[in-house]
Amino acid sequence: GVTSTITLTEVLTKPRRLGDVELENTYRKILLQTRNILILPVVPVIAERAADLRARYNLKTPDALQIATALDAGCDAFLTNDAGIQRVTDLKILIVSELE
């Protein structure tokens, strides 16, 4: 799978707010040490694509950056917990709660 560097920001915020160092370390280990997860940086081409996605779909910046990263990496689908992202038609959106 592919994700953006902003995933670290997104997943580490709550454990840090709660002072849960163990959970923070677990998330960090999953993202940084799992062989099948490629973390891509936000480079100018991704930032510009994210701006386009924000303009077209009224997305929040983190969501637009994540989707732009997936598109730039050539992903066929985007996995999320946010059903509101289904309005994006540039790639297939998979909602975690709807998967069996």
Image (tube, rainbow, N blue to C red):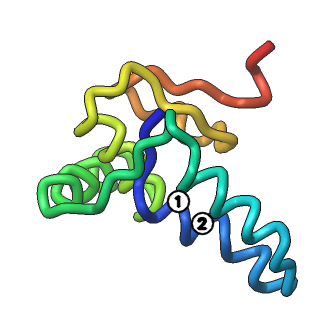
> At label 2, which amino acid type do we have?
Glu
- Residue 57 versus residue 100 in the image, above or below: below
Which circle marks residue 72 in the picture? Answer: none
Residue closer to the observer: 33 or 8: 33
- Residue 67 versus residue 96 in the image, above or below: below
For image coordinates 55% across by 66% down, the residue present is 8
Which circle marks residue 7 in the picture? Answer: 1
Mark 2, residues whose alpha carbon is within 10 Å: few (<14), some, or many (≥20)? few
Residue closer to the observer: 29 or 64: 29
**Quarter of the C terminus within the rendering:** top right
Q: Quadrant of residue 21?
A: bottom right
The image shows residue 22 at horizontal and vertical percentages of 84, 71
The image shows residue 58 at horizontal and vertical percentages of 40, 53
> At label 1, which amino acid type do we have?
Thr
The image shows residue 23 at horizontal and vertical percentages of 82, 67
Distance of mark 1 from mark 2, alpha carbons?
Answer: 5 Å
Q: Which residue is mark 2?
A: 10
42 to the left or right of 28: left
Q: Quadrant of residue 77?
A: top left
For image coordinates 41% across by 64% down, the residue present is 61
- Mark 1–mark 2 contact, CB under 8 Å? yes
The image shows residue 40 at horizontal and vertical percentages of 33, 52
